[in-house]
Image (cartoon, grey):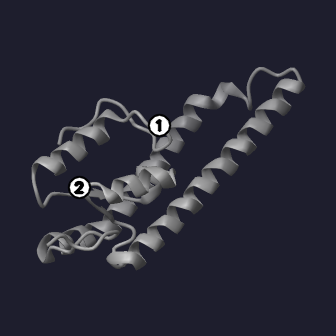
Amino acid sequence: MAKPDRVESGKKGDRPELRKALDYCKKNKGAKLIVATMSRLTRDTKFLLALLDGSVDVMFADLPQVPTGAMGRFFLTMMAAVAEFEAGLTSERTKAVLAQVKARGEKRLGNPTNLPEAQRRGAASMKAAADAFAARVLPTIHDIQRNGRRHCGRSPRP
């Protein structure tokens, strides 16, 4: 698949690149959607369950040990519920801080004079973390490719 033109958030319902990936998997029987982490795919339990009930096999690189069947579905449902809960708490904390800043009469957080340097350091740190994660999950992806592991959240199809 081509690299997306924009970054899509797991919080959004309208995700054209995800739709393309799901359509590709449906058209190409046996293709699996491999996602780095569940929270990157979604933080919405209802969305995850609808996806697991659909006709696309989904695998999570950070959860290769999730069993198939009812136990795997239960585990993934709990993980999605925790991710949804954490996203809600983060949103509440952010709104509270922004309300405090506004109440003090300030228009923005922090000192914007060093923002470009901070962004550059942050981007470099995020790239390093992403590279480290990729190095950790690549052996799992290769193992899946070699051994044809089945979907993590659903019983295999006949």
Q: Quadrant of the C terminus?
A: bottom left
Badge 1 element: loop
Badge 2 element: loop
Residue at left offset 40%, top offset 51%? 41
Picture quadrant where residue 152 is located: bottom left
Left or right: residue 91 versus residue 3 is right
Residue denoted by label 1: 12
Indicate the position of residue 123 as horizontal and vertical percent values: 47, 42
How many numbered marks have been drawn onto this rendered protein structure?
2
Indicate the position of residue 121 as horizontal and vertical percent values: 53, 43
Residue denoted by label 2: 55
Up-down: is 84 above or below 6? below
Q: Which of 127 and 76 lies nearest the eye of the viewer? A: 76
Q: Residues within 10 Å of mark 2 (few under 14, many from 20)?
A: some
Point out the residue furthest to the right here: 104
Q: Quadrant of the N terminus?
A: top left
